[in-house]
Image (cartoon, rainbow, N blue to C red):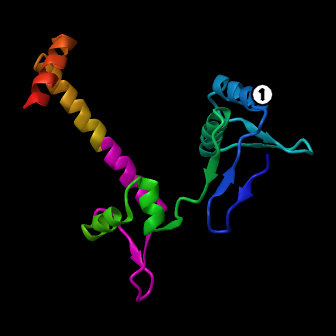
């Protein structure tokens, strides 16, 4: 299926093919080769794929093999506050609060109230928050393990939950 552009400034969305057989063959090929391949032109000319392009191709093929659409966009793209909030899965008001608290860098458009965020800053914030959550969860798991909570029987938890709900 051919890619469809939503607008010149927005992402290029590429839908997976209806018949995923070709995509599965390509995914298998990429899984069996760890070094970058070469691009073969219709005239037989070969150009080696740089490693970052090869890695991106592997990720795209993996997503499309699973039937997912893929969005391609430059990393320095600017987002509105609503676009950034949607990307982070939070409300626009929450995003504005984060901006006011200097959690994320932004730029103002001239003398207006409108703010723009760089996509790479939003993605870096998202990744940082994911890592913080993962770290906190690992610490909680370690503490629970140290306290012997994983040794307790599931029925003990169920009983404690029933007692807590009665209170």
Which stretch is magenta? 103-131
Residue 78: x %, y % from top left:
50, 68
From the viewer's perspective, is residue 115 above or below residue 42? below
Q: Say left or right for 115 vs 64.
A: left
Residue at the image point whose x is 18% and y is 10% from the top: 153
Q: Is residue 127 above or below residue 73?
A: above
Identify the secondary structure beneath mark 1: helix
Q: Which residue is mark 1?
A: 21
Tell me the quarter of the picture where residue 106 sits: bottom left
Within 10 Å of disc 1 (Cα), the crowding (few <14, some 14-19, many 20+) is: few
x then y, percent, for residue 107: 40, 75
Identify the image quadrant of the N terminus: top right
Q: Residue furthest left?
A: 167
Residue 118 seen: no
In the rendered image of this protein, does residue 97 appear above or below residue 128?
below
Compare residues 86 and 8 and report the one nearer the observer: 86
Q: Position of residue 19 (x, y in %)?
A: 79, 32
Examine the rendering and report whether any part of residue 106 can be seen: yes
Q: Is residue 126 magenta?
A: yes
Q: Residue furthest front?
A: 166
Classify residue 104 by image quadrant. bottom left
Does the magenta run of residues contain 5? Answer: no
Q: Residue at x 71, y 46 (%)?
A: 15
Please identify the quadrant where the C terminus is shown: top left
Residue in the foreground of this view, choosing between 54 and 98: 98
The front one of 130 and 86 is 86
């Amino acid at each position: 299926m051919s890619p469809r552009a939503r607008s010149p400034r927005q992402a290029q969305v590429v839908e997976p093919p209806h018949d995923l057989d070709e995509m599965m063959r390509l995914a298998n090929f990429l899984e069996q080769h760890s070094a970058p391949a070469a691009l073969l032109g219709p005239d037989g000319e070969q150009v080696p794929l740089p490693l970052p392009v090869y890695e991106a191709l592997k990720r795209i093929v993996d997503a499309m093999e699973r039937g997912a659409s893929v969005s391609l966009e430059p990393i320095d793209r600017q987002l509105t506050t609503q676009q950034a909030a949607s990307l982070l899965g939070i409300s626009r008001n929450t995003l504005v609060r984060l901006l006011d608290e200097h959690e994320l860098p932004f730029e103002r458009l001239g003398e207006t109230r409108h703010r723009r965020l760089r996509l790479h800053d939003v993605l870096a914030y998202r990744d940082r928050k994911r890592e913080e959550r993962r770290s906190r969860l690992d610490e909680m798991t370690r503490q629970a393990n140290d306290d012997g909570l994983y040794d307790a029987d599931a029925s003990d938890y169920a009983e404690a939950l029933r007692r807590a709900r009665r209170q």
